[in-house]
Image (cartoon, rainbow, N blue to C red):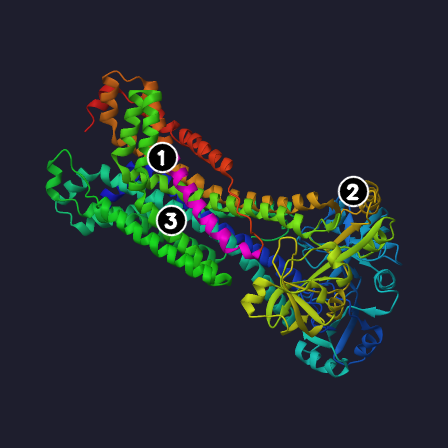
Amino acid sequence: MRKVTWRNLVARKIRLALSGFAIVLGVAFIAGSFIFTDALGGAFNGIIKGTTADVGVAPAGAANFDSGPDARTIPASLVERLRQVPQVAAADGVDQVQNLFVIGKDGKLVGGNGPPGLGFNYTTTKAITGNQITELVDGRLPHGPSQIALDTDTADKANYQIGDTVTLVTPGNPPLRKATLTGLVKFGSSGGLVGATLTIFDRAGIQQLFFGGRDVYSSVSLTAANGVSQEQLKRAVEPLLPNGVVAKTGDQVAADGQKVISQALGFINTFLLVFAAVAMIVGTFLIINTFSILVAQRSRELALLRAMGATKRQVNRAVLAEAAAVGFIGSTVGIGAGYLLADGLKALFAVFGLDLGQASFPLQLRTVVVSYIVGMVVTMVAAYLPARRAGRIAPVAAMRDDAMVPESSLRRRFLGGLAGAAVGAVLMALGFAGSGSRGLLVIGLGILAILVGVALMSPVLGRPIVRGLGATYARAFGTVGVLARENSLRNPRRTAATASALMVGLTLVALMSILGQSAKASTDKAVQSTVTADFVVSNATQAPFSPAVADEISTLPGIRSVSRFRGASAKVDGHGGFVGAADPRSLSSALKLTMAAGGSSQLSDSTILVDSNTARGNGYQVGDTVTLKLQGGTQRLKVAGLFKASPVVPANFVVTLDTLRRGGLRPVDSLVFVSAAPNADLAKIRSEIDAITKNLPTVKLQDQQEYADAQKNQINTLLYLIYALLGLAVIIAVLGIVNTLALSVIERVREVGLLRAVGMSRRQLRWMVLLESVSIAVLGAILGIVMGIGFGVALQRAVADQGIDVLSIPWVQFLVFVVIAAFVGMLAAVLPARRAAKLNVLDAITTE
């Protein structure tokens, strides 16, 4: 039996390779996801350790990897006292500025869109890695506020040389500055900053520019004396620290930072693995179909083996051994392809500013083990049912010309699918009733159960669609069309299984299309009904900008009000959320919040507004008191109102600007809403605001419609990324059509020969195969779109109270999908059709 198995593998290597390729793609996505996130995690961990001294001293909650720009400072006198501690070898005061970006010689921003722009004073502090945190590698150190040094990568990207005048966008006043580049520095041992930019000042210069000339520091880095541990150093300096200032060991700081990074990367990894799971599910359909067809084609051979003494178990094991070989080879190649995919992800993220050019891409044992387990298990599970059917072939069947593999009843299959779909519907209902990631997981399982159920029912559900297409074929192509229809209906399981692979991919594409279109329609509605300002100045780099922009705009003639909107991550009663801040006096002139309870006019320094979804999830009502924890401390605030969630209000909570200031955050703006005075010339006001912002690439000026379009463009970008990732599943589904048609042609060699013998031309034969492929593709597209519409409408209604309250179904787009599916079906049939047309008529007729 081992020899027979090996012979079958060699004899059918091309057919099995197509199934193996599905495993290659799925495993490549899994391996690539792990390799990429491991590289990303390693790069960030290198930054964390490379910037962490033996002990760090800072205001409580500041200097963390996830903290915002902190306004609190430490007096220089404390640094002098810390230097006198015997356990301290060196104490360096560090001044840090965030949202400080470099504009290149070409006028474009360097970095941004995620990676931060950082400014520091130069120190010789060594990190816990043993390397100096920043080291001068060329030129000289800056002196005074008009001189800077840059990290080598930033200078190279901006095309600056030592001696050039550098343009900086700053969070201070003025927001645009010029400085002379005097030197280049390297960060750590590798210099890798993952796309972040590093601007270095001298101590007096950075303090004059960003700290009002005060001799203060953001934090203090301590280096331990010889023989002193981090913990000993921490205990030695703690008695000298004033209230609100804490000391942390370097190891603790690194561990806290790595925890934050792991949580963020966990989301990215999960996001990518979801698409890998979709690819593997689609690949499972392909493998089941391939092995089912191969077993059916070899039914007489398998019956002969049974007649010669092979047991059911041996025949079963022989088929599973072939599947194991396919799974092993596919997984091995897939791990290698995962490296290529990780490299592609590196290039994709580089577009968004995340530079991993100096990161290492490790192949962890975990990646290898998970890839092999998933690849092998999926292949073996997919091949199990065809293997069982192979073992049930009776030995006496070898003596008949029409030996057939026993098939299950369509009625039983339909009822099983109906039960699976019912279970899926229940799971989705439970998921909608739940919350958070657990609720999403249950919804995902429900969608999967319904998809599997519909796939089981598809031989029955798809018959009317195939017959409808067949009627069109008969009128357009005559006898060729009739034959194509009958061939599609001949084996409904095979046709439906092949179409189901495409159905899964297009279901998710249609689902995301509805959610995306609904989100864009809801954004349009929200901007029209919520934004009352005439213009919006927003950040162009996902980073806040200088408050001086709003200050300058407010001095223009014809301006009625200028309302700032700021934001920060916070915890309210221990639950994470995003807090927005605005001036209560100008809020109503910028945004018209739809209140579910209470009133926005009640917002004050002692109150808070909560969106109704968050309030419902946490049981908040107007009049309740909540605890708001920002990096600068905890505040108790009274709930003054509940507002309806909206895409235009990017916050779960709204507080005053002073509440945010008390939380220790530096005053920087995320949005500025500008309202013109009655009868003011809007065109003139726009040109005057544009004169203020045109040289600042970190901000953009928009009217209401432009602001809505910008929000919709962000949705489109996400949709395009999801479509690209789902494209892998569609590619696998197309491979399934190719494989099914190729195996079907081999199975019908004698029939093809007879058709040619009675007068069918090669061209007519090719059209017959092409039309069969179109039937499969269109069936998968229609089932997928119908399913996607059902899921999309259900999910939109479920999230309607979170701001996506307008249902929009892109019917024209779905029609295009069906047309594209038909075209793809024709492309998939090209090679099988050519193979069928090239068959020798006499050889085909005499085929056994």
User: Label 2: which residue?
Assistant: 107
Quick one: label 2, few (<14), some, or many (20+) residues within 10 Å? Answer: few
Find residue 776 and name its label. Answer: 1
**What residue sits 25% from the left and 21% below the top?**
755
Magenta stretch in the rendered image: 776-802
- Count of numbered marks: 3
Give the prevailing secondary structure in the magenta stretch.
helix
Q: Residue 514's x, y, as percent?
A: 51, 45
Which comes sooner in the sequence, label 2 or label 3?
A: 2
Q: Residue 287's x, y, as percent?
A: 34, 44
Which comes sooner in the sequence, label 1 or label 2?
A: 2
SS type, badge 3: helix
Quick one: label 1, few (<14), some, or many (20+) residues within 10 Å? Answer: many
Circles 1, 2 touching at the beta carbon (< 8 Å): no
Q: Residue 472's x, y, as percent?
A: 35, 26
Tell me which amino acid carries mark 1.
Ile
Quick one: label 3, few (<14), some, or many (20+) residues within 10 Å? Answer: many
Tell me which amino acid carries mark 2.
Gly
Which of 755/24 is in front?
755
Q: Residue 212's x, y, as percent?
A: 87, 64
Tell me which amino acid carries mark 3.
Leu
Which of 726/237 is in front?
726
Relative to 657, say whether 311 is above or below: above
Relative to 555, say whether 821 is above or below: above
